[in-house]
């Protein structure tokens, strides 16, 4: 089959890859980079079938453009489909508010949902003599790897984590001939998760003991719930705000994708939910606020940030990646943020903790060696060559966006 990345091969973001052969063309993922303004992958040709690994915007954000046009089937978990719908609608909302290009319409989103063919881990379908199975990716609830089998088997990882988190179990390796694998954390390893959790909880208690407020900006999908589960046993007044609330409810509708449904239900009960704008005044008097706007660029976090930014007793605890040209990165690098067009100095404490849902450098290498493929194709990485010294026994392919290559499948 012929393969071509429309985005995301040599970068983290705006994923999309076509597979073409035997008279059919498959698209695996089609996302956007949620920068300001958003960045899109290369235009997609006419597609017969689309496979979506999970619901983060850099993987799902452009799917309605293709499905709205081609009416092709979309294979994904039902949980990923429902959360992706939230993300797609939010993308349109932001585009309209910021006067960005609108890459698709609300009708396209509706058609996309009508074209979803739900699959779950362990399921297998056959399309034009190619068997396609779904495997657990361990990244966020509902995230999947796809295994394409005909003469040999090919695994496409999407985003993976091989270590269990509070929210999900880790991905398991499987023998294959071709392995498409993400390389987000090239040349970087995570500190032990238990140490990170211990340090985070100690900082939370320290800030509250000195009379401050703890603000935890979180991504809505995965990170909000992971942090809520970590904090649930603390006896403080805790609030959760933003899209993460809706995502939590969807996660609980699909407990089969959770490591421990009871733990997430328990965490949800411990948190007060901001369900209307007026509730934010009450939340600001709380001790811990977990809110969406993980890179401090928009959403409820801005109001809370404005409230505590001049209070040295309070703290902002970052728990996710801070991309270039975001408020979060500006805060880390310069100690200031932009609020309502004005650059403001931040006097409260700032700390960052590694709660990544991606496998790190060594975990990726271990996963590759356990799969024992002939060909390793790296994607979703801006430093893929850093894996090469450790993979001299494998045929490693580093495709570029827009470059076509062939593999036996």
Image (spheres, rainbow, N blue to C red):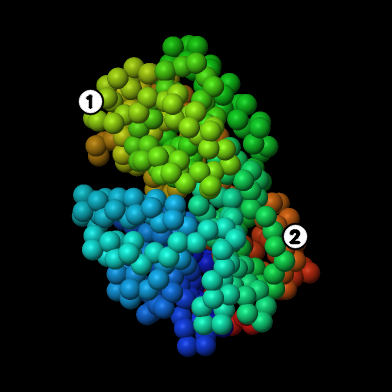
* Closest to the observer, 117 or 9: 117
Q: Secondary structure at mark 1?
A: loop
Task: Give the residue at the far right of this rendering.
Answer: 393
Q: Residues within 10 Å of mark 2 (few under 14, many from 20)?
A: some
Quarter of the image for the N terminus: give it.
bottom right
Percent position (x, y) of residue 4? 50, 76
What is the CA distance from the residue labelled 1 to the residue labelled 2?
52 Å
Instruction: Name which residue lies at 29% across and 53% down.
Output: 89
> Are dots 1 and 2 in contact, CB under 8 Å?
no
Counting residues from the N terminus, which is met first, the one under dot 1 or under dot 2? 1
Expressed as whole percent of the image width and height from the top left, the position of residue 382 reads 55, 60
At x 34%, y 54%, the residue is 85
State the SS at label 2.
Answer: helix
- The residue drawn where x is 41% and y is 60% is 60
Question: Looking at the image, can residue 354 be seen?
Answer: no
Q: Residues within 10 Å of mark 1 (few under 14, many from 20)?
A: few
Along the viewing direction, whichever of 339 and 192 lies nearer the viewer = 192
Find disc 2 in the rendering and name its residue: 370
Residue 297, by quadrant, is top left
The answer to which quarter of the image holds residue 100 is bottom left
In the displayed structure, 23 sits above or below 88; it is below
Q: Is residue 352 above or below residue 163?
A: above
Taking the image as drawn, is residue 273 in sight?
yes
Q: Indicate which disc residue 278 carries.
A: 1
Q: Is residue 114 left or right of residue 398?
A: left
The image position of residue 261, as x and y in percent, is: 53, 37
Give above or below for 314 relative to 247: above
- Using the image as rendered, state which of residue 113 and residue 105 is in the foreground: 113
């Amino acid at each position: 089959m012929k393969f071509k990345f429309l985005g995301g091969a040599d970068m983290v973001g705006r994923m999309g890859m076509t597979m073409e052969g035997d008279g059919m063309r498959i698209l695996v993922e089609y996302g956007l980079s949620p920068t300001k303004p958003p960045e899109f992958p290369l235009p997609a040709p006419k597609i017969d079938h689309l496979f979506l690994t999970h619901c983060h915007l850099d993987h799902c954000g452009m799917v309605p453009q293709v499905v709205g046009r081609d009416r092709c089937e979309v294979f994904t978990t039902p949980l990923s489909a429902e959360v992706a719908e939230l993300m797609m609608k939010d993308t349109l909302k932001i585009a309209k508010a910021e006067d960005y290009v609108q890459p698709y319409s609300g009708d396209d989103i509706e058609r996309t949902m009508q074209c979803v063919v739900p699959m779950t881990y362990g399921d297998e379908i056959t399309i034009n003599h190619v068997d396609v199975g779904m495997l657990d990716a361990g990244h966020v609830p509902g995230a999947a790897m796809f295994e394409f089998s005909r003469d040999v088997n090919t695994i496409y990882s999407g985003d993976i984590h091989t270590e269990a988190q509070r929210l999900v179990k880790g991905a398991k390796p499987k023998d294959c001939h071709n392995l498409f694998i993400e390389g987000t954390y090239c040349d970087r390893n995570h500190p032990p998760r238990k140490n990170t959790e211990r340090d985070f909880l100690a900082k939370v208690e320290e800030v509250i003991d000195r009379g401050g407020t703890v603000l935890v900006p979180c991504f809505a999908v995965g990170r909000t719930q992971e942090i809520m589960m970590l904090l649930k046993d603390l006896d403080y007044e805790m609030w959760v705000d933003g899209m993460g609330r809706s995502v939590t409810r969807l996660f609980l509708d699909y407990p089969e994708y959770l490591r421990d449904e009871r733990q997430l239900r328990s965490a949800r009960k411990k948190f007060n939910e901001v369900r209307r704008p007026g509730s934010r005044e009450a939340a600001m008097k709380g001790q811990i606020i977990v809110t969406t706007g993980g890179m401090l660029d928009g959403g409820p976090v801005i109001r809370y940030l404005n409230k505590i930014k001049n209070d040295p007793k309070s703290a902002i605890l970052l728990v996710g990646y801070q991309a270039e040209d975001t408020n979060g990165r500006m805060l880390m690098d310069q100690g200031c943020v932009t609020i309502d067009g004005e650059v403001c100095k931040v006097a409260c404490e700032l700390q960052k903790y590694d709660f990544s849902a991606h496998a790190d450098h060594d975990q990726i290498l271990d996963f590759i060696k356990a799969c024992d493929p002939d060909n390793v194709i790296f994607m979703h990485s801006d430093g893929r060559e850093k894996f090469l010294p450790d993979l001299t026994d494998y045929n490693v392919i580093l495709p570029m966006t827009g470059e076509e290559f062939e593999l036996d499948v």
